Amino acid sequence: LPVDFNERSIAIVGTGLIGGSIGLGLRSRGYSGEIVAFDRPEISARARARGAADTVADSLEAACRDASVVILATPVGDIIGLLPQVARCAAPGAVITDTGSTKTRIFETARHSFSLPTVGGSPRAEASSHDARADVAFVGGHPMAGRESGGIEHAGPDLFAGRRWLLLDETLGGAPSARGRIERLVRSLGAEPILLDAEEHDRRMALVSHLPQLLSSTLAAMLDDPADRDAAALAGPGLADMLRLAHSPYDVWRDILLTNSDEIERALERFQQRLEEVRLQLRTRETQRLFETARRVHDRLPRGS
Amino acid sequence: LPVDFNERSIAIVGTGLIGGSIGLGLRSRGYSGEIVAFDRPEISARARARGAADTVADSLEAACRDASVVILATPVGDIIGLLPQVARCAAPGAVITDTGSTKTRIFETARHSFSLPTVGGSPRAEASSHDARADVAFVGGHPMAGRESGGIEHAGPDLFAGRRWLLLDETLGGAPSARGRIERLVRSLGAEPILLDAEEHDRRMALVSHLPQLLSSTLAAMLDDPADRDAAALAGPGLADMLRLAHSPYDVWRDILLTNSDEIERALERFQQRLEEVRLQLRTRETQRLFETARRVHDRLPRGS
């Protein structure tokens, strides 16, 4: 894949699994600009040692100073906390993007941080009162990739290859070219950009990511009852599949659950209602329909997922 | 692994994935006795062509006539239907076993078919009224192995290697050596025999196999709603894990659900209660505990499952 990503310098803020893999992926595909890392010193040093960055910045300001693209690849809560600072220190013309797993709260924070118009608000009045940065842009993103284990040691150049990478269809501020620059970043990493809005993103993720995570965690936690430990010891490959997500660390999930609670509750309610129907219909022919529908949905899943 | 299985002739009734793999596994490990297959003619012919059997019987009676071990490897409903016939035609000294995924109903049927004493009943009176076969034994079994796809074409000699194979701790009829002969069969296939009673088996399977199956099917079926199809298209590896079981064919599950409905309903109720708690506590610190407990259970799962 030819790299069509010619930014002079990028900053990766947060060089764990995702940020580290972005650096390694760009480098392995021939990106020749500079990559600056910012994270806790021991993390960014490891990222540089692995080749995911050229230099390590000792502050967010130093990381952003010369970067034409700033990538926030920290947990969602940190992205929300960092956005106002990034809005202040980003270089003119820079595009800021992020890799957070929920988007509505990040998008709201970005809108506020960059003093950009809210729906129904008066852009000029608000901008002038907030020291607007119309010269930088924010393009929210979410790569649909991950591994069971996080951290720079699990990062790799092909983490995003063949994966989808959701981008918010509304760019905040900057030149009209801003989103195209992030799309080139995404394609350079072998991923496919998909545009949608923040609320639709969070609604879909509640269904296909957050609900499955909670089902796996709930099933696993239920089998912790002492009376059930002998049962869990009989686990076959089916249960192992269903409990794979139960390995996910709370660190990663805390912010996701906090920033998408409404949609997650709705998804849980819908699932609960369906499961109640399944239980009540267990001894009827409806069960056949359940299995046939389920199989059809399974067989429609995107390949390689 | 040395084969310590010296039955002169075995009959495999049902030569799909499980029955076929038993034949292939015994043969590949040097079993030198005869293997007779009985199934629909086109299935048993394919089993013989693959080397899973030496000869094909054209009736259950013909298959059982000379077999010292009869293995019923059909769906649960067929096992229940076949047991009375097998009880009539099995050769003296034969041990009958099965591979059904639920055990209580099969065990009850076997007890009745072989006219063996029920708890509190009078063995002699019952036996004399039913033409008892005290010269044959029944040892119920359930290999904890499977594949996403069934059928003789997916059978293989190592399907059971390293897997557990549950055996009922109560042998019906026959000599005291009967269970040992089935344990040798199981070990010859590379599996580990685990003894438990039929009701405990079904309770545990409801939790670690039947409940997970229904959760996967329910989640998949829920994503069939037209409004959610775009969401399902964003599936990552986590959802794919959670929906892998949704591929299971209803053919296999119908009998399992019918013969273990009580335990499955109990398991569903327990899960529903847990999930309701998870939803109500979503915005509290209890969620941290959920994830930590879930991760511990995940990490305790048997290796290779």
Image (cartoon, coloured by chain):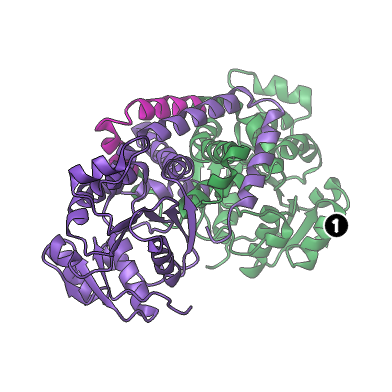
Chain colours: A purple, B green
Q: Residue at x 27, y 36 (%)?
A: B289
Magenta stretch: dominant SS? Answer: helix
Q: Residue at x 27, y 65 (%)?
A: A152
Residue B105 spot, x, y in % from top left: 65, 30
Span highlighted in magenta in the image:
B267-295
Q: Chain of mark 1?
A: B
Can residue A276 be found in the magenta stretch? Answer: no
Residue located beneath label 1 in the image: B42
Would you place residue A64 above or below residue A131 in this image?
A: below
Asked whether residue B56 is in view, the answer is: no
Frontmost residue, B118 versus B175: B118
Residue A127 spot, x, y in % from top left: 24, 45
**Type of the residue with mark 1:** Glu
Residue B199 spot, x, y in % from top left: 54, 30
Can residue B288 be found in the magenta stretch? Answer: yes
**How busy is the neighbourhood of tag 1: few (under 14 within 10 Å), some, or many (20 plus)?**
few
The answer to which image quadrant residue B155 occupies is bottom right
